Amino acid sequence: MKQKNSISAADDIILKLKILAKEKESVRRKLAVTAAKLAVTAEKLAATAKEKESVRRKLAVTAAKLASTATKLATTAKEKESVRRKLAVTAAKLAATAEKLAVTAKEKERVRRKLVITAAKLAVTAEKLVITAAKLAATAEKLAIAAEEKEGVRRKLAITAEEKEDVRRKLVVIAAKLAATAEEKEDVRRKLVVTAAKLATVAEEKEGVRRKLVVTAEEKEDVRRKLVVIAQKLKNSHETLEHKVFERTKELEMSRAKEEAILLSIGDGLLVTDEKGNIIIINKTAEKLLGIKSEEVLGKIFSEEVVLVDEKGVVIPPEKHPVEMALTGSVTTASGPTYYYARKDKTKFPMAIMATPVLLNGKVIGTIKIFRDITSEREVDKAKTEFVSLASHQLRTPLSAVSWYAEMLLAGDVGDLNEKQKKYLDEVYRSNQRMVELVNALLDVSSLELGTFLIEPEAIDLSKLVQSVIDEQKSQISAKQISFSFLFEKSMSKMRADPKHIRMVVQNILSNAVKYTHEGGRIKLSISVFEKKNVLIKLSDTGYGIPKNQQDKIFTKLFRADNVRDKDTDGTGLGLYIVKSIVENSGGKVWFESLGGKENKGTTFYVKLPLNGKEVLPVSI
Amino acid sequence: MEIVKTSSTHFLANNPNISNFKSSMKKQKTVLIVEDEKSLRGAMVDILCIKNFIPIFAKNGREGVELALSRHPDLILLDLVMPEMDGTAALTAIRADDWGKNVPIIILTNLRTTNDQIIADAMTHNPTYYLVKSDCKLHDIVKKIEVVLKS
């Protein structure tokens, strides 16, 4: 059995060996296939290497082109040398890069060759596989490793290609930059051309200026020559002028002497002082009037040399002298109180003095005083006043006599009269009264015009005063059947006024209203406080009115409006003139409203008077 | 001094010698009229007689002063503008007298009242009153005399 068992075990081993051989044969075949595949792969790698070689060549060509470009750029211009050098460097770098690429290509070639050898070895190995099957697996592994390495190389090659592409792009950029640099250079060149042109222009201008300077120098020379001529002419003119000045001075002296003679011969006293009041000119009339000699007073203060006194002989203090007032106040003193000069012989005479400051650029540099003896004028004024006085006395005396005797007769003091006698005598009496009024009015006017109207305010009862005036005229008012009303503001305190004058004012405006209002007309009189400090007398009538074109003349002395003249009414034309004079002298105002032109629209007169009165002193004559 | 005849119908000035007339009129007041103008003087004398006064009169200031100081009238009517001695001088002289300094004196004038130096001067010698002849009736003068004598 053991034999049998050994025979069967040998048979099993033979069988297993046969299976193993078959399996080895299958592996050998598979290895042959793999070797064939590897050969194909090696061929493909060879092809890739060839393509890479072609790329390398193209790059070499590009490098060569760039080198040529660099060379071209290098050869452009001497002034572009530095650029060219850079380009050369760049080109060198590029060449180096190209060389590196070439080296890489060689290495690749070497790898390729190694692969070819390896492939050949593999083919040998494959053939040897039949002998050393065990080596096959190792070999296969090696091949696998080699394949992996190839894959790495391939990848590297791919990366290298990308790097090349990158380099190419950079080269393109560099080329573009180079082109830009070339343009900038061109630009710089053009600017240089422009600058050169400008410099040429400046050079031309300088030349122009130089030429002008030459011309100016010529002109200067010309001017110098002219100046010499002018200097000569001036010398001649100067001589002529000196002669003329000499003649003119003579003329001026004559003229001055003449003017002085005129000044000194003025009929009025003339006195000129400087700003301190020192006498610098005094004419003959002044010497004569003052009884002094010019030698005695020239250069002296006037107010100290001549004594000025007032009417009563009281000495006027120097600061009140017209000359001093003109000096200190820079005002012309023309009017004012009358002063008298007291002469050394104690005689005095009244003076009209006008002292005026002499202004130069707004500064008082002296005064001019003109004065004259007004003795004769004063005499005339005195005669006028005396005439008024005399007229008053002499005219009114017979009027008073007529009045008084008629009065006694009418009163029946010496027996009764019959009606006819009474009527006639009444006519005589009234006419006489009118004459008295006219004389009084004329005398008032004379007084007013002489400025001798004295207003003496006193406390008066205006209501009573006005009522008495109304009573005086009541008969005329009722005779014309005029409706009359009188309103008096009771609250009004007593006022101060000159009763004589207030009476005259009210008399005049009321008698006018009565006189110039139709029968059956209306008159309204009212008195009220006005603006607190004044009294307002308002008198309205429905009378003839004042024609519009004559309203501005109604206060004029002796003026009577046409419409009332035509009406055959009595009147002196003095009433309103007196009213206005009195009212204005009393610090009041009189005015009226009248719808003139249209008849019978009436007139309203207003008299405003201050409640506290106003003392007005007469201006002495 | 003018003595007016008593027979005169109008000029009824009393004669200082008519003692019986004076005694019978004991209450009557004597008024001295100093006036140079005859017609005015006559009117005043007549109205005073009519109104029961005893008028005595002078034609100028000098006579007026003499009469005033010798007769001591109750009141004096004094004109201002007169020959020989004017009213102001007469007024001064009367006021200088012991009796005269208190006698009522009414100035009667026809001068302007508004502004007249003569009036202004006269007013400084204390006249009792002053009237403007042409502006007042004769009866107003009498009334004024009565008022002044009453006070």
Image (spheres, coloured by chain):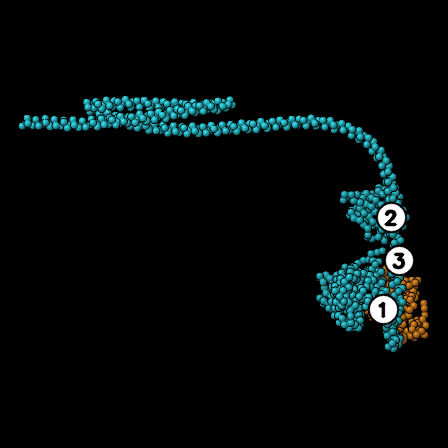
Chain letter belonging to callout 1: A
Q: Which residue position is annotated with label 3?
A: A383
Left of A601 or right of it: where is A72?
A: left
Q: Dot 1, crowdedness within 10 Å: few (<14), some or many (≥20)?
A: some
Same chain, marks 3 and 2? yes
Q: Which chain is orange?
A: B
Q: Amino acid at mark 3?
A: Ala
Tell me what residue is drawn at x 39 percent, y 24 percent: A60
Q: Is residue A106 left or right of residue B7?
A: left
Residue type at mark 2 is: Asp
Shade representing chain A: cyan
Depth check: A306 or B24 in front?
A: A306
Nearer-N-terminus badge (1/2) = 2
Q: Residue A500 in the image: x percent, y percent?
A: 80, 64
Question: Residue B139, located in which quarter of the rendered image?
Answer: bottom right
Q: CA distance from mark 3 to mark 2?
A: 24 Å
Marks 1 and 3, the one that precedes in the sequence = 3
Q: Quadrant of residue A210?
A: top right
Give how far across and how far down residue B91 sits, in percent: 88, 63
Q: Which residue is mark 1?
A: A433
Residue A268: mark:
2
- Tell me residue A514's x, y (percent): 79, 69
Give SS at disc 2: loop
The residue lying toward the viewer, choosing from A365 and B100, is A365
Q: Is disc 1 in contact with disc 2, using a CB cutoff of under 8 Å?
A: no
Relative vertical location of residue A518 with respect to residue A195 in this rendering, above or below: below
Q: What is the CA distance from the residue labelled 1 to the residue labelled 2?
A: 49 Å
For this orientation, the residue located farthest to the left is: A1
